[in-house]
Image (spheres, rainbow, N blue to C red):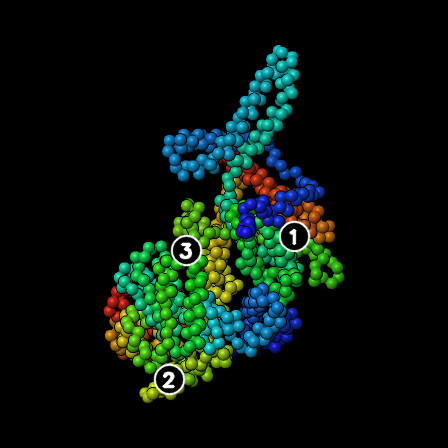
Amino acid sequence: MPRIHPGLIRRTHATSPLVARLLPICRDLRSSYRELTWLRDHAQHICRNAPLQNANRLLQSYVLRRSRGEPLQYILGTEYFGPLEIQCRPGVLIPRQETAASVTHLVNLLSSAGKTLPPRLRVLDLCTGTGCIPLLFQHEYYFRHKGQNDSFPRLDVVGVDNSSVALRLAEKNKRLQLAALRWSSSSTSTKHQSLKAMTFMYADVLRGEETLQLGTFDILISNPPYISSTDYWRNTSPSVRKFEPHEALVPPANANGSLNDAHDGDLFYHHLHDIALRVNAQIVLLEVADLEQAHRVSRALNGPWDGVEIWRDEPAARDENENTVCSSHLGSASIPILGLGNGRSVFAYRGRGAAWLGK
Amino acid sequence: MRSKPFSPMSASPWICARCLRSATRIRRTFNVRRWQSTTATSDKISPALLVRAQAIAKEHANLTEKLANDFDTRDAKRLGELNSTAAALREYEQAHASLRELSSLLESSDQELRELAEEDVEPTQARIQLASNGLKSSLVPVHPFAHLPCLLEIRPGAGGDEAGIFAGDLLRMYEGFCARNGLRTSVLKLDTADFTGASGGAGSRLHVQEAVLEVETPGSYGILRCEAGVHRVQRVPATESKGRTHTSAASVLVLPSLPTDGAQNMDENSFNDPNSDYFVDTKDVRTDVMRAGGAGGQHVNKTESAVRLTHAPTGIVVTIQESRSQLRNRETAWQLLRSRIAQLRREEREEEQARLRRGAGAGKAGRENKVRTYNYGQSRVSDHRSGLDVRNLGEVMDGGMALDQVMQSVRAWMAEQEVLDLVAEEEGKTGGKG
């Protein structure tokens, strides 16, 4: 991390002490300035509804919290996930932009396929957190099919988490999306009904018995805790370590058996794979930490999968300078790597899933 | 006993206080002087223009006949466009006919009749003058972007800090102007130097590096088009310690703001037609989002949402980071990029036409020309195109009525210039043929 010159902090402090406070966290002047603008807007918004508050004092407290490393999303209470504004709360992982890019790309792939989809498309999201993935999938799916009069299959999405705080927050996010929808479309629309039917339920992925009762699903998505315990201390930002829930980032320590220390971030994927087969999922999309983990996970998907791909941060992006599809040879099979950025997710399909994707 | 329910309908209609005030306001008039005479010179209409007007009138007649038989929206629209010219030509011809009648009367032997005719000659001349002016202005084509909303881009020019402060003053001036005229605005982009905008609060003066103001009301491009160019300020800056007067400048660009879906009202100019000004090939545009360095994903929670678009053929770069939502930034960036490209293409075409005309001579209100001076020492605003001087600088800077007046004069001047261009063009055409 490049050092911030003390002179810069001093000079900034002379014109604007608040920006100077944010500088060590934001690392550059421009983003400190942006964050201060957002914090000020939020403070003023709060004060408009609660006239007893003093906007300036509130702003001071926000800046103080932010300067101690608290994520901006927890202070402001929301984060944008694609086009959706998702509520955030301490104790639940903040949605990441990369996740949104993968989910949007998956929906785009499905929508271009068209008619071959089953009459009822069922999607399961494990480790749902704020409920951002089900909500975004649902939103994008109906956005893609806008204008077609109900000829496309209806969507059923189920989110699963083992944290009651997360489940409550997910329910709240769903309620807010429903409220937002009420203004824009009639309550009889399929999108409205599908959103209303969206459920969030308690289950622990590591103890598979509960998830058995979920029935069958077509698509399984998950953004599980995937950071290994060494990586956690080495590569996560201090703000993440100090303020975001450890259990949403790192799999539990007392892993049973074969995994060695360096790969203890992979714990969830074996269970996710088992569940995917048990619920008869035809497509899986699993977020991973980096390209190496992506390779390990795709090697582990040695079941009945017809195709496995690795997606980078922006799976839809194409760049002439970089090779968009480069294959990595692992053993006999070659795995295409799509997009730009870090290795972000592993995508696999089989049977009817291949037909839905038009593969 | 049942009380009588309150019925809002029975009361006299409710009028919003602002409407009431504006309806009863006494319009102030200002001490306005014209220093230069820039009225269109020839009162005789050129034969080339007349030929063109007659052609239009003929098309108008044909269309009217056609529409009487079967209705077609496209024809009806075209008819509406031609209406004003046809009417103006009719008026012009009638005026001429009455003049001819008068001149025949002038030669009559009856003394009394001759006197009566002589009395009528002057008003008829005036009527011809009026009619030919009307005919000329009706021939000037409506600017293709005039019906669109617009984006105002303000950037400081020469003059350092003072120019930045002046750019902020201009931004406030236009915001005031739009608010008073009922044009909806929103600030799309506001870059301030040393971040005075964030730290100083509402009262302090903005030190603008780049500002983009969107005026969302349709037709605002036509209204604000005359503001494009370099605005010069002469004053003692706030940053000056010795009390010297400085001259600095800020440039204003007026871009057409294009509707996000090309469907409405833009049949010939849709985004998908490669020949239109609005067409931007997505393959030419490179999108950069500021990706987190390092591991990304769950490892960091970045708040960076900036989006940068680069249009390869023109080299135009747009960076937007105002919103926390990357998607919204992307939309804003696309809007700005489209507008800039459309304006650029339009300007290129206009330059081409100007070169073809040669000698039409009028300085285009492009970005290189100084268009207006704000002199704080004399409390004076003078526009260099229309030659209008207004001694009401304070009100101009608040975007008040005085600014309306200045803009009105510029619009009139632009119309005159366009007529001159048109005459030159038509004469060039007929000259080339003959």
Q: Which residue is mark 2?
A: A264
| Label 1: how many Cα within 10 Å (few below 14, some 14–19, many 20+) | some
Spatial separation of the CA atoms under disc 2 and disc 3: 47 Å
| Label 2: how many Cα within 10 Å (few below 14, some 14–19, many 20+) | many
Q: Are marks 3 and 1 in contact (CB under 8 Å)?
A: no
Percent from the top left, x then y, of residue B31? 71, 42
Residue B281, disc? 3
| B46 relative to A322, above or below | above
Percent from the top left, x then y, of residue B388? 66, 43
In which quadrant of the rendered image does the C terminus of chain A lie?
bottom left
| Label 3: how many Cα within 10 Å (few below 14, some 14–19, many 20+) | few
**Mark 3 or mark 1: whose residue is earlier in sequence:** 3
Secondary structure of the residue carrying tag 1 is loop
Which residue lies most toward the front here? B1
Q: Amino acid at mark 1?
A: Asp
Q: Residue at x 29, y 69 (%)?
A: A218
Can see residue B80?
yes
Going by the image, does B375 lie left or right of B157?
right
Relative depth, front residue between B246 and B68 = B68
Relative depth, front residue between A119 and A316 = A119
Spatial separation of the CA atoms under disc 3 and disc 1: 41 Å
Q: Residue at x 60, y 40 (%)?
A: B412
Q: Which residue is mark 1?
A: B398
Q: Mark 3, chain letter?
A: B
